[in-house]
Image (tube, helix red, strand yellow):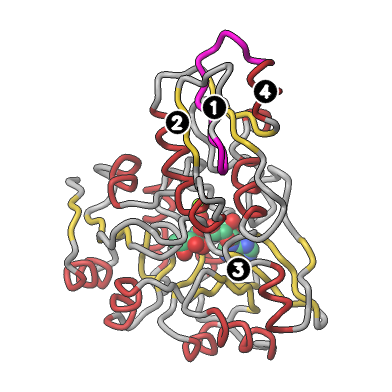
Amino acid sequence: METLIGTDIDHAAALLSRGEVVAIPTETVYGLAANALDPDAVLRIYEAKHRPRFNPLILHVPSIKAFGLYAHEIPEACFQLADAFAPGPLTFLLPKRADVPDIVTAGSDLVALRIPGHPVALELLSRLSFPLAAPSANPSGYISPVTAAHVLQGLNGRIPYILDGGPCTVGLESTIISFRDGGIRLHRYGAITPDDIKRVTGVYPEEAINAHNAPDAPGQLKSHYAPDHPLYMGDVKTLMKQHAGKRIAVISFMHGYSNPEPSVSFVLSPAGDLHEAARHLFHALRNADAADVDLIIAEEFPGEGLGWAINDRLSRAQFIHRT
Ligand code: TXA
Ligand code: MG
């Protein structure tokens, strides 16, 4: 199959309406989309990504009005958060309605719903009569794509079309939350932070991150976002000493490192802006992985705001977590 890249929303809509998979831009990362109500189409997503069938998919919808079609028992806090942050990088886990095929939720009775904050994604969704199931558009386990070219690198020949919406402006996958007994649970760190959620709802979310590689646990796998080169995260100077004599790519926040000089260096935001750093993170990880080095060393980011999400991705990309 030949994979084309283009900006033709009608073409993408026509392919999706025929049950094909299409890579689509969102503000977080590129998604690999299919008609969520067509189990055969959804199956093609799992096949193209080689994604384990136990790992469920996010349902993308054009507006909050669609939530009631696919979920029920939607708490007030969900509407408050959607008012504040949707369309945007926030995904809600809610009790699913029977219309959502089991293959989308991998058998769970919760469905993940998100309104993507990208004009092309919203325009596409508004032209379709069905929601889009979409995981990130990378081969399972590799770094999520934040440009159309990244999608092509990973899925060339496996999908017919990549809808190009430019580089992703957030650059990290959405925050994922669920609701229980008046509380809010945080399943994945993203650009919407625990403080953002507290500000809007009055409730500080409780961390519910899955740190296991257990195949029966839906949600995040411990090893993910993994470059092919071994990656070590922590204090850069200490790690560079430990790996003296090797060719090293360093990924850091504001400052570069010298003495010893790394072979390649990626400073994600010289101005110290965590949003900018997040936007550059997956570019840097891919470029570090493509460099002629023995290993990658990444600095631990500040434990505030988007720093949590960046540290979460880097820690999952680490060598020690690979099985
Ligand atoms: O920003 C994003 O969320 C991107 C864009 C494309 O929307 N999507 C994305 O999808 O990151 P994916 O599949 O790479 O990550 C979705 C995460 C997975 O860890 C999955 O296990 C979890 O959401 N998830 C989805 N549905 C779930 C459910 N019903 N119950 C528990 N976890 C769920
Ligand atoms: Mg993913």
Which segment did they paint magenta?
242-255
Decide: marks 1, 2 in contact (CB < 8 A)? yes
Which residue is identified by label 4?
Answer: 239
Q: Which residue is drawn at 56% across and 87% down?
A: 83
Which residue is identified by label 3?
Answer: 192
Dot 3 or dot 4: first in sequence order is: 3
Residue 119: image location, x then y, percent: 33, 75
Is residue 105 in view?
A: yes
Q: Local crowd at mark 4 within 10 Å, few (<14), some, or many (≥20)? A: some
Is residue 323 in view?
A: no
Which residue is identified by label 2?
Answer: 288
Q: Which residue is drawn at 44% across and 30% down?
A: 289
Q: What quarter of the picture does the N terminus occupy?
A: top left
Residue 247 colored magenta? Answer: yes
Dot 1 or dot 2: first in sequence order is: 2
Dot 3 or dot 1: first in sequence order is: 3
Q: What element carries label 1?
A: strand
